[in-house]
Amino acid sequence: MRGQFYVIGVGPGDPELMTLKAARLLEKCPVWFVPKAHQNGESTALTILAGSVSTEGKEILEHHFPMKKIRMGESVDAEVEAAWKAAAEAILAKLEAGIDVAFPTLGDPAIYSTGFYVCDTLLKTVPNLPISIVPGVSSIGASAAAVNQPLCLGDDRMVVVPATFENGQLRETLEQFDTVVMMKVHRVMGKVVGLLTELDLLDKAVLVERSSRSDQRVRRDWAAAVKEEPHYFSTIIVRK
């Protein structure tokens, strides 16, 4: 009998924000296939979940996924695609042996998660493969909680955008929506802050770095933020 594959959201960083279901399934699965952004680095997802679930007796398979841009509808970088295929092959070997595999992912799997690329790759090989997606607390929600404000109320309209993919439409987006959440802002801070200044929205914006973690920072000191490149895990919320 083939094993079950789980893509499990482990939350934004605070181990206490992992769901009960996530913890239960991670305890149940004998194999954890954990993603990491750098070849010689550590898995952030593993660090988070290890704060709530014991690693004792687990087979932990770390896999490097290159941090390169993926544009929907366009060809995928060969190195990225190779990483997806290698991950799918390793996971499928365990599943075919009847072993359940958990793939922990940061935040919620539905929001910019490598887990879904792996799922798609697996399903191209085995279309009827049993896959379960377990939602988690998103960095978006955690960032709003960090500043004690809602993301949207009543008839507010909200949009989430990956700032590094800004294609000239960010101005229009900021003008049209009541709340704009910008993820992946660390490399484009100068451009974003410049646009917020032009639109007179700086006082409506807040930067949250490493939401929910012990070293979390909530910032509105935009001049300083532009000079110091913020942490990779940074989100800007603009609520008009």
Image (cartoon, rainbow, N blue to C red):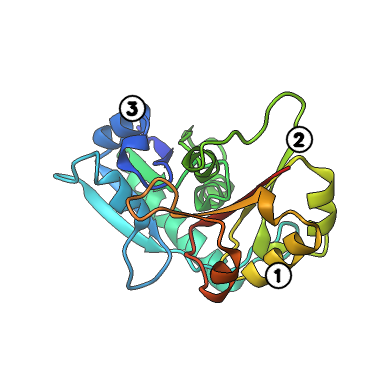
Decide: is 31 above or below 219. above
Q: Which mark is residue 20?
A: 3
Q: Nearer the viewer, residue 11 or 234?
A: 234
- Residue at point 57%, 36% (across, down): 149
As helix, strand or loop, the secondary structure at mark 2 comes to loop
Q: In the shown orientation, is residue 58 left or right of residue 121?
A: left
52 is higher (above) or lower (below) than 87? above
Q: Position of residue 32 (x, y in %)?
A: 30, 47
Q: Which residue is mark 1?
A: 191
Counting other residues with Cα less than 10 Å from the Cα at mark 1, is it few (<14), some (14-19), or many (20 or more)? some
Residue 161 showing in the rendered view:
no
Q: Residue at x 78, y 58 (%)?
A: 170
Residue highlighted by disc 2? 157
Q: Is residue 73 left or right of residue 220?
A: right
Closer to the camera in the image, 124 or 7: 7
Badge 3 amino acid: Leu
Q: CA distance from mark 2 to mark 1?
A: 24 Å
Counting residues from the start of the chain, the first of labels 2 and 1 encountered is 2
The location of residue 62, given as percent across then percent down, is: 32, 59
Name the image quarter holding the C terminus: top right
Tag 3–tag 1 contact (CB < 8 Å): no
Residue 194 drawn at (x, y percent): 73, 68
